[in-house]
Amino acid sequence: MAEHYASGVWQVKEGKDEEFVKRWTEFLQWSRENFPAMVEANLLRDRNTAGHYVSFSEWTDAASRDAWKKAPEFKTRITACVELCDNMQGADYDLAVTV
């Protein structure tokens, strides 16, 4: 059984898409290397709204995901992504679906 989460809704600043995707990919790499309970993660771009992205992650269990969010480096790395956004929702928001 895995836990699926809508983990972020991102509105990236105009002209910052490439840098945002690079930082998010680095954040994902760090996550995968340090938290093997992350089964899958995706960043989806909205074709209809410039700069709009949604991120999803899949975890083996909710406790592992909570440990990831509490890791000392998490805030620094997520902030590097958020700095490129006009708006980011999701830090304390989860839509969890168990499958």
Image (spheres, rainbow, N blue to C red):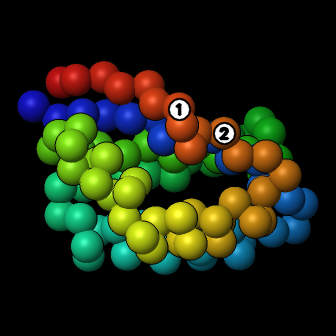
Residue 25 in sight here: no
Q: Is residue 12 left or right of residue 70?
A: right
**Residue 89 got which mark?**
2
Q: Nearer the viewer, residue 97 or 66?
A: 66
Q: Is residue 26 above or below residue 67?
A: below
**Label number found at residue 44:** none
Dot 1: element: loop
Residue depicted at 80% across the width and 39% down the height: 49
Decide if residue 35 is in sight here.
Answer: yes
Mark 1 vs 2: CB contact within 8 A: yes
- Amino acid of disc 2: Gln
* Residue depicted at 31% across the width and 47% down the height: 66
Relative side of 63 to 17, left or right: left
- Residue lying furthest right in this view? 14
Q: Mark 1 — residue?
A: 93
Please, what is the three-letter code of the amino acid marked with disc 1?
Tyr
Mark 2 secondary-structure assignment? strand
User: Extreme left residue here?
Assistant: 1
- Image point 54% across, 71% down: which residue? 77
Q: Residue at x 53, y 32 (%)?
A: 93
User: What is the x, y in percent for residue 15?
Assistant: 87, 67
